[in-house]
Image: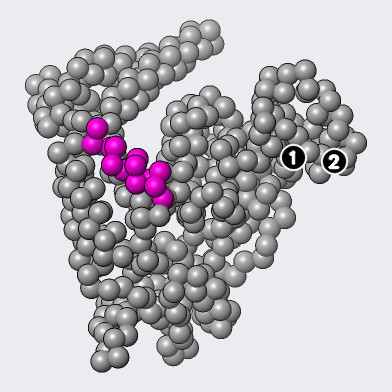
Amino acid sequence: MKCARAVAVMVVLAGAVAVFGQDRGGAMRRVERSYRITDASADAGAILDAVRKRVAVIGVTAQAKGAREIVLSIPYPEEVERADSAVEGAVDAFDKHTPKRGELEKALALAGAAREAALDGLVNDMPGLKTRLPGLEKAFDEVIAARRDQESAVGGEIKAAAVNRAYEAESRYFKEDEAFFSRILSRYELDAALDMARDGTDREAEARLEGLAEKYPMQAAWIRPAVEAQAKLEAAGGGKYVKPASFDLILRATDRLEFRVALAREQLGAAYEQTLAEFNAKGAEAKVTVGGASARWFVVAAGDREQFVDRSLVVESRRDKVYLLCYDDSEHTLLHADAAKKPWMAMVGRLATNDGVLSLGFSLDARGAGYMRRLSEKNVNRDMALLLSDEALTAPTLRGVIAEEGEISFGHPDARRSAEDIQREVKTLRESMNGLPVEVER
């Protein structure tokens, strides 16, 4: 995979935030946030230039302070700060009354009266959720029993049957879990809805925010105060300003990671063979239209290309490269350059290993999570490609609605790719994913 060369930089948040009020001429109150470069080999001038490009579009200035420190000066009126704090307080209150998956799983792991008491405590404020608990408990217990059988199974066929039973039990539990949480709004979803309506110019986002209390009646008493606080923030002009703490994320964001729903062969129908013929004749420039929506070909990144083969994806090879057909319209994509969407951010996460498969996590900011939720809601059971600089990295099948986070899998080592090859791929990817290669340490 061809990736832009990146400079390895470490930046650490230094000291308290300084606040400057209006002067006699009525100048805007500004907040200063200081970042110190800790990598002794980094080019401080290049880092400063990169920071300035990143923050200039939102009215923030960046200046060097000494040889290894960068100071951001951020416009942030006191009235807006108070309104922001009121919104955060309302969201915190909402969060206290909202069950979380981690808490639910801990409660289910208990037994007898302890489990009953823990579950009652979780849904005490929302009696309507109690009707989902028996099915959830049964499915959870079946998963535990199936896993025990799998661990104790001996012999090929017996072991295989036990693995299948465990898989089926986990599938039933996931369905019960999804049914339980589909009835409530999460804090992250509320944050996304509030953020998308922040500047008061997106009428669709405002309508969605105002309809949350009706859509989630069990939480209406805690949703309404947040919506009311958001209206006061909008009245204070909050949409014109970025919260100072948000710059810790802005400096880590990448503008290269994007998402596109991939086309399936059955969607092309009788046009499948003709589509491939045009690709072979014209290459990646071949124009494709499916159901009135535009689509185009994207090269698959070097690495685990086998994951794209022997599936329903529309894949074709040309001149030692593999190409994947994906949508190219706003409805089926999440792109940074989409004029129909407001700016959103993706952040690089941590490396993880699951059953020997190395994966790199990523997360989206509140606005990006809102867009992703809408995209995944409309495309469940379809394949969605994750692309870095227009190269397809992977194309997992959407098994449900997703929002704020996900991962990129690098597959198992094999004869074609050693563990060392995969490690190099991951290193290159991490460096190139950071649009501004900066990591904030607290």
In the figure, is residue 426 to the left or right of 438?
Answer: right
Is disc 2 placed on a helix, strand or loop? helix
Between 183 and 150, the one lying in front of the other is 183
- The amino acid type, in three-letter code, at marker 2 is Gly
In the figure, is residue 358 to the left or right of 14?
Answer: right
Is disc 1 placed on a helix, strand or loop? strand
Residue 283's tag is 2
Look at the image and give the residue range highlighted in magenta: 202-214
Check residue 421 for magenta coloring.
no
The overriding secondary structure of the stretch rendered in magenta is helix
Contact, CB < 8 Å: mark 2 with mark 1? yes
Sequence-earlier tag: 2 or 1: 2
Between 409 and 156, the one lying in front of the other is 409
| Residue at image mark 1 | 297
- The amino acid type, in three-letter code, at marker 1 is Trp
Question: Picture coordinates of residue 271 (x, y %)?
Answer: 78, 22
State which quadrant residue 333 falls in.
top right
Q: Is residue 283 above or below residue 315?
A: below
Binning the other alpha carbons within 10 Å of mark 1 as few (below 14), some (14 to 19) or many (20 upward) gives many
Q: Is residue 106 above or below residue 29?
A: above
Query: What residue appears at the point 21 percent right and 54 percent down from the top-left corner?
Result: 229
Question: Picture coordinates of residue 23 (x, y %)?
Answer: 27, 89
Between 60 and 122, the one lying in front of the other is 60
Question: Picture coordinates of residue 427 (x, y %)?
Answer: 60, 56
Query: What residue appears at the point 26 percent right and 61 percent down from the top-left corner?
Result: 235
Q: Is residue 118 something one can see in this rendering?
A: no
Rounded to the nearest whole Å, what is the CA distance between mark 2 and mark 1? 8 Å
Check residue 203 for magenta coloring.
yes
